[in-house]
Amino acid sequence: MEQLYKTLLGAWKQRKLPAVIERDIAIEQYASLNPPKITVISGFRRTGKTYLLFQLINKLGKEKCVYLNFEDERIPRTTEFLTNLLPAITAYYGPIEYLFLDEIHVMPQWSIWLRRVYDTEKIRFFVTGSSSKMSSKEIPTELRGRFMEIRVFPLDFREFLRFRTAEKNASENLLLEEYLTYGGLPEVVLIEENKKIELLQNYYNTVIRRDIIERFRIRSEENLKALLNLLLSSTQYTISRLYNSLKSVGYGVSKSTLQTFLGYIETAYLAYSVPVFSPKVKEQMQWPRKIYFIDTGFTSQLSGKFSKNLGRLYENLAFLQLRREGDGRDIFYWKNKLHEEVDFVVKQGIAVKQLIQVCYDLDNIDTRKREERALLKASSELRCRNLLIITEREEGIRKKDGKIINYIPLIKWLREKKTKAMN
């Protein structure tokens, strides 16, 4: 075992870190938290969690840090390896300040070990793990109160433009179209266009297999895949509607199983559901939920539809940006009994902070009136005057019924947004 530690630590000492295109997630603020906390980096697969660690190591100085990836086949999956890890590091390096542990969840009793060394050592810990095992909901009990979570999403539009530096002379509108079409997963952004769909399909299948089917030991694999195919082609759902749709094409899956599957899908960060805004819990449970996927590449390329629904892609992208910003907000949609609807109700604490409509095309006067009418009714009911409509190209303000409605093109709204690190 001693020789293995020397081999692994020697390899790290000699390793040249890969070039990193920086993300806008201010991970460095976690390196100086006082009192120190274990920093857990979670999120959907292939969103760049490991490269985010490298981004921080470059800023801190590699000589202060040790990094281990526990998916290295040379590392035995034993508690003994963890028990002797810090003594081996100290013997090889002397004292270190930062320890980066990638995919640590594969090790037995990792959380018990991590709590012990966190409580007894003056080292700052950064850990990543499977998207289905490292969220704040899934983190083991012994680490509660000892960690901070950074949720990593696919690239936002500002980051996407940075990754596409080879296209400096390209129109931003064309780049936005590419972003909507293929999404913001870093490797998909960087790979040549004729490989993007294949890579998206590979990621999608891997998450279904490893983070849902294997993680939760699902036996009715075909039922799960049929549900996901239905969700990819839907904007909202109820359990009853899903049940009836699947039953009509020969899938015998119970409503309780569908509810369980939906929970697994969200745990894997593959999709998010948004409830209607209502003070009545019963209404939130009974009304349809809207569904948004973690990356527009999935809804654009894997939904089985042969034409892009730009309205849906705009709305999905807006949701992801709102979700990235975190800061304790809750996101709902609003709908009344006349079926008038507002896409997003942004609530913070007990107050509604903003009402947002997303509409790709407002050239039709009836569409414009419908969007404004719903926004104004929700404004009166929810006592919120911060009203926004995100569009393809319209910008400015319109005064309506004594209220101001702001219009902004999606591309400008995305450029002005900044991802926050604390989620």
Image (tube, helix red, strand yellow):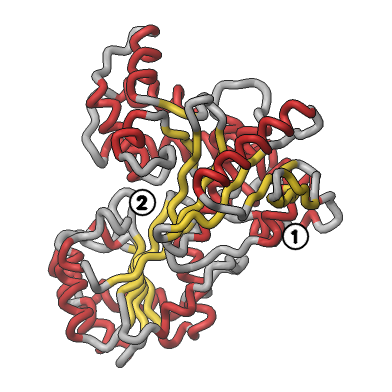
Point out residue 305 in the picture as x, y percentages from the top left corner: 60, 21
**Which residue sits furthest right?**
169
Q: Quadrant of residue 121?
A: bottom left
Mark 1 neighbour density, 10 Å: few (under 14) some (14–19) many (20 or more): few
Position of the N terminus, as image quadrant, is: bottom left
Q: CA distance from mark 2 to mark 1?
A: 29 Å
Q: Mark 2 highlights which residue?
A: 131
Q: Give SS at disc 2.
A: loop
Point out residue 213 in the picture as x, y percentages from the top left corner: 29, 34
Q: Is residue 159 visible?
A: yes
Q: Nearer the viewer, residue 39 or 97?
A: 39
From the viewer's perspective, tell me whether residue 404 is left or right of residue 256. right
Q: Give SS at disc 1.
A: helix
Q: Is residue 272 visible?
A: no
Q: Nearer the viewer, residue 276 or 422?
A: 276
Position of the C terminus, as image quadrant, is: bottom left
Callout 2, which amino acid?
A: Ser
Residue under the point 47% across and 83% down: 62
Mark 2 neighbour density, 10 Å: few (under 14) some (14–19) many (20 or more): many
Q: Quadrant of residue 212?
A: top left
Q: Mark 1 highlights which residue?
A: 165
